[in-house]
Amino acid sequence: MAHGQVALSARGSLSLRALSVLLFLGGQQLLCVVLAQATQATAEAALAVANRALQAALVSPEAHHPDQPLWRAALGAADWAVVVSKEAGSPPTVRAALRLSARVHGLTGWYSRSFAAWDEFLVEGGELSSAPEPSPDGDLPSDVGLFSAAGTQLGFARYQLGDLQDATAYYLTVLELVPDEPEALRWLGRIAFESDRADIAERYFARLVELRPDDEAASFYLQLSRERQEIGTEASDAFRRGINSYEAGDLTAALDEFERAFEANQGFIEAALWSGRVSLELDRPEVAVPYWQLVVQERPGDAGAAWFLEYALAQRQWGVQAGRSFYEGQAAYQSGDLVLASERFQSAVAANDAFLEAWVWAARSLQERGEPAEALRYWQGVLERDPADERAGWFVIRAEYAVAHGNVAGPAYIDALAHFQAGDRLEARRLLETAVRANERFADAWGYLGRIAFLEQRYADAFEAYRRAAELAPDNEDYAFFREEARRMSVELQTP
């Protein structure tokens, strides 16, 4: 049968069955030729054919793409239905044809044609449905979904071309009809952010975060928008570049950006903090100190900032290696690791012989870990550098006694003397008993036990303690004398 000789119905309309056959056999081009010759076809018939064409495409295995035959036919049928309905159809038919055209073009990803059809549909009084469209192979997107997809895709295409004005227009059109469309909110926020309009960007991102609390990107840009308003665009952007460089391991570039951020806004304390932090990591305490001083001044209750200032000051004064070793020792000491602590403090002394506090802590940690001979050397080093240090003098004596009489007996004896002089004879006696249990040949400890017993009129105990002291130190006349005095007093007390 030649083209143009297709059977017509008795009323002059092209048979719907014949049109359906043409869709499968001839595709879009043949369909348009036939419809052009069927001048008597009604708008309703064209719309019915277009709907049939769409259903045929939907149930086929073909991908939703304009290059696929059945989808080309569906697109052509939809276009023709629009033409015919505009010429001879009623307003409802025109709206139905425009809606169908918008949907078919949207389903195939032809967003410009889809958006144009939706625009005409709305001008003609159409209303977008939010309900999914039933289909033989499952529900299709709603009018709202297809309209939003077309508008946001076109907006993104314009954004990629750098046409922010047209991109904004598309996204705003979408929001006008779909106020909470996430992608329109997101890209309007991005465009405002990139146009240095942080106040507007904040509004869009704030709404997006309300809708999607778990959207990390939206939360990030909301934070940046607020940050820009608070500290300025230049400071914010430099600071973020600094964070990126820091995370990439480029500390030099990071410091440059953090300092640039602080120069742009010298009230931006976070930039000062990061400048101080990275300066220390680059072993530049002379740069770090002023930044940490500023942070501490602005945040007097910030214990971390105060610690970093002390650390930076120590490195600046005593050298990077000495300062680092000293604070590593402090950390180890606080965690209870006396071995590592003493090693780090000794390293600090080795790095800078003038670092007095390193000498003190090396001595202290060595003494506490039970190495009095090594501790004594460091305490003596403290006294050489500060002869007036009474604390060091006392610890020297304590260390000397520990070396001479043992790690338990020596310190117990020194502590006992302190309690005795303070009038606490009970604690002094307990400590002296600890000393002689740890070292039975500790003459001075036995002597003080005798003295306390004598003062308390426990003469038998005094005699025994002085006896032991005299045997261990036969040249000490005091021990021998008080031994005999204690014996005499004990006998007198027993005599009726």
Image (cartoon, helix red, strand yellow):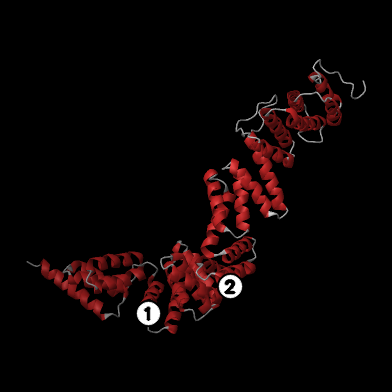
Mark 1 Cα shell of 10 Å, populated few (<14), some (14-19), many (≥20): some
What SS does tag 2 mark? loop
Q: Nearer the viewer, mark 1 or mark 2?
A: 2
Q: Is residue 255 found left or right of 15 in the rendered image?
A: left
Mark 2 Cα shell of 10 Å, populated few (<14), some (14-19), many (≥20): some
Residue 210, image x, y percentages: 52, 45
Residue 60, image x, y percentages: 77, 26
Q: Residue at x 54, y 43 (%)?
A: 211
Residue 324, image x, y percentages: 53, 71
Q: Is residue 328 found left or right of 432 in the rendered image?
A: right
Q: Is residue 492 above or below residue 50?
A: below
Q: Is residue 180 above or below residue 482?
A: above
Do we see residue 304 in this rendering? yes
Q: Quadrant of residue 54?
A: top right
In this view, the residue farthest toward the right is 2
User: What numbered label is drawn on residue 283?
Assistant: 2
Q: Earlier in the sequence, mark 1 or mark 2?
A: 2
Find the distance from the CA under tag 1 to the CA under tag 2: 36 Å
Q: Nearer the viewer, residue 120 or 55?
A: 120
Hey, what amino acid is under mark 2?
Answer: Asp
Q: Quadrant of residue 475?
A: bottom left
What SS does tag 1 mark? helix
User: What numbered label is drawn on residue 393?
Assistant: 1
Residue 459, image x, y percentages: 17, 69
Q: Quadrant of the C terminus?
A: bottom left
Q: Residue at x 31, y 70 (%)?
A: 415
